[in-house]
Amino acid sequence: MFLNSIALSPERIQRLQEIASTSIGPLIEGAIKFTIPLAIITFIIGLIIAIFTALARISSSKILRGIARVYVSIIRGTPLLVQLFIIFYGLPTIGVVIDPFPSAVIGFSLNVGAYASEIIRAAILSIPKGQWEAAYSIGMNYSQALRKIVLPQAARVSVPPLSNSFIGLVKDTSLAATILVAETFRRAQEIASMNYEFLFVYTMAALVYWVICFILSIIQGRIEGRLDRFVGKSGGLS
Amino acid sequence: MISIQGLRKSFGSMEVIKNVDLDIEQGKVVVIIGPSGSGKSTLLRCLNVLETPNGGIISIDDQQLDFNKSVSKKAIGAFRQLTGMVFQGYNLFPHLTAMGNVTEGLTTVKGQSKKEAEKTAGQLLAKVGLADHKEKYPYQLSGGQEQRVAIARALAMDPKVMLFDEPTSALDPELVNEVLRVMKDLAHEGMTMAVVTHEMRFAQEVADEVIFIDGGVIVERGAPADIFNNPQHERTKKFLSLLQ
């Protein structure tokens, strides 16, 4: 009986082919119009937040350190889905109405900012103190030493974990479906609710995400290769 | 050239430099020796304010920092440019080539054009015998070559004084001489130098004065021949006997 239900008759195969050809367009459109831009925009904003948060966390100012800690603690300590609901469904009750896409950008950026700040903080702290001292000894000030000497080296250390974050972010953007952003997964929900081919349509959506992430991991490898040029292929042990 | 008065530095409750006075005249090479933990490296690091002294006055050339008062970051930055520092562990910037290491300060701090900076850097790298290694990254260089790049990097900023903090201690024995040779050349050119080192032969050959530090105070100072052949102080005798 169970087997019957997955046995594919010629008519069923034809029907699935039709669904595939009519729904792949909207799914890819959702990816190109929303999933990918959302991921890229929020990652860039998130990284900027993350760099400043990381710098605040290692600064000598107690107030800055405190603010950064509270921010990271709140974002990491609450579910992303809840944060999105607060922004999109919660804020309007106090008169702050934000459209779905900007809501998603705010929610995801704050999220990336908190998580990536820990990566960047760790990367900055992993750069030996002697690098700062050498930079100071040739007359650089803090911001010059940071920009020219420390951050370029920290960037190399943080590329693998940041790539991880970015790939995670691409998949997390599917949560934007819940706040009405017409991205890949929301398209899939809409299509499946009409034809009831849940397994098939959601699998297609999954494939779209997988292809994006696969391409990203190739790009990650390229970036790492470029940044590795100053330590050699053996990781600096040559 | 350099004048230090009443310099004090503590780490927590540990007093590492206790009221040190020291003058170094222009063009002189002073070698600072002493047991580990004696404060000799700290003294050197106070000179370019990598360690902030707890008290005392340091003058180099016509600039002065008075650590008995509060000192601004800007003043420290300007003061640092009077000195060039060479570290035990080289501390080259690993993401930059030999050329990049030397030009970085010129472009970023002195605001020179890349072309201008590369001209200066090329001359300095040639001077330390690395004309053929300009485009190499630090990981592609030997320790001795790295340290010579580090010397070129410090010289690029046109310092009044060069500070060497155990420049050969991390090197394999066969690489020590190539670094010492560069330092000797500098000394002969009339560079004012303060060198913390265990290379007693270098001290004997090049130093105008040897200073023995122990327990954060200058125990004894004098011409190399006097210090090495005829030390007056018990602690100096003991330290030198341990080096034999």
Image: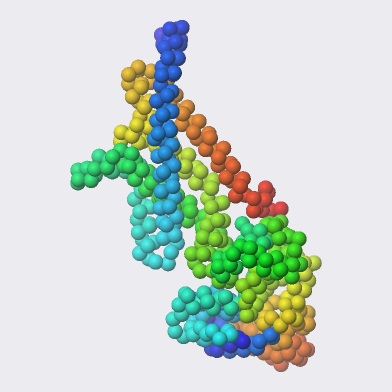
The answer to whether any part of residue A172 appears in the image is: no
Q: Does residue A23 appear left or right of residue A238 in this picture?
A: left
Q: Is residue B145 above or below residue A172?
A: below
**What colour scheme does the image use?**
rainbow
Q: Is residue B175 above or below residue A109?
A: below
Residue B184 position, x and y percent, is 75, 77
Which residue is pictured at 68% across the width and 49% down the height?
A234
Q: Is residue B169 above or below residue A102?
A: below
Residue A61 position, x and y percent, is 39, 66
Residue B60 falls in which quadrant of the image?
Answer: bottom right
Which residue is pictured at 61% across the width and 72% down the height?
B157
Which residue is pictured at 43% across the width and 10% down the height?
A12
In-front residue for pair B35/A133: A133
Q: Quadrant of the N terminus of chain A?
A: top left
Q: Residue furthest bottom?
A: B232
In-front residue for pair A158/B11: A158
